[in-house]
Amino acid sequence: MEYEEKRKELVNQIKEEGIKKQVLEAMGKVPRHLFVPKYLKNSAYIDSPLPIGNKQTISAPHMVAIMCDVLDIDKGMKILEIGAGSGYNAAVMAEMVGKEGHIYSIERIPFLKQFAENNLREAGYTNVTVIEADGTLGYPPQAPYERMCVTSAAPSIPLPLKEQLSAGGIMVIPVGKYMQNLILAHKLDDGTFREEKLGGVIFVPLIGKYGYREAIE
Ligand code: SAM
């Protein structure tokens, strides 16, 4: 089966989970097979995480769908992503914000920063900037952000991320070590946060100054 047909099937499967039309349309456009290592291209439209090197993964499509759905993304938004990985989640958000919006995506592993950048270029996305840095510090040059999507699990919400989110902004972030919970955090106008627990998830750890310490091999 051709990639396009497989992608349609995957999107139809995800639709069953009650995901918004805008997210489904974006996922229907992004060529996920360009965001996985060559030897995994035939598995690109299976609803599963896949290895992308350096012990990291491209998240399962339904997880990308859930995170983009709860973030309530609109055209023109400026979004910060922590954990570019393959660049796929950034591409889905890039479709959703359109040409007038922009995604800043941080990746700590140099090989993956390059992988994400190459994949996004090959897929034709010009409204995503990939930055090699410790994402737990946020990205002050472009702050504040209307939305934040953290794609690795933190011990708690990093303070710099809280500070760099706009008032009225929304962040989604997995929190916890072994038992992780997906947290949806709304920043209120007075700077305080209202947090909602969306349920159990499994992500690789967020490693950095306001995250976990680097794993000892
Ligand atoms: N969003 C990615 C995608 O669409 O392919 C999947 C991300 S993967 C589950 C998590 C990523 O977070 C890994 O690439 C990992 O290297 C990165 N990461 C972990 N800690 C980080 C940090 N402090 N700053 C930036 N990236 C980090």
Image (tube, rainbow, N blue to C red):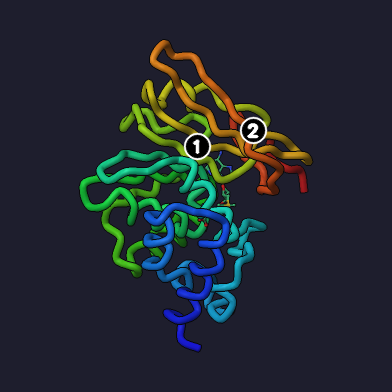
Q: Tell me the quarter of the picture where residue 95 sits.
A: bottom left
**Residue 108 left/right relative to 80:** right
Identity of the residue furthest to the left in this view: 100
- Looking at this view, is 194 or 30 the one in front? 194
Instruction: Specify which label sits upstream in the sequence, 2 or 1.
Output: 1
Q: Nearer the viewer, residue 188 or 138?
A: 188
Q: The residue under label 1 is which amino acid type?
A: Gly
**In the figure, residue 46 lies in which quadrant?**
bottom right
Q: Residue at 53% of width from left, 37% of height from top?
A: 172
| Residue positioned 26% across, 57% down in the render | 126
Q: For ligand 1, tell me if the residue under mark 1 lies within 8 Å.
A: yes
Please tell me whether mark 2 or mark 1 is closer to you in this view. Answer: 2
- Work out whether residue 27 or residue 110 is closer to the camera in this orientation and state it: 27
Residue at image location 49% in from the left, 14% down from the top: 192
What amino acid type should be assigned to the residue bearing mark 2? Lys
Q: Kindly state the secondary structure of the residue where label 1 is placed.
A: helix
10 Å neighbourhood of mark 2: few (<14), some, or many (≥20)?
A: some
Position in image of residue 149 (x %, y %) = 48, 41
On screen, 191 above or below 154?
A: above
Relative to 104, say whether 191 is above or below.
above
Tell me the tag on residue 197: 2
Tell which of 200 and 177 is nearer to you: 200
Q: Is residue 32 left or right of residue 203?
A: left
Check disc 1 and report the residue beneath it. 135
Instruction: Tell me residue 9's x, y (percent).
Output: 51, 75
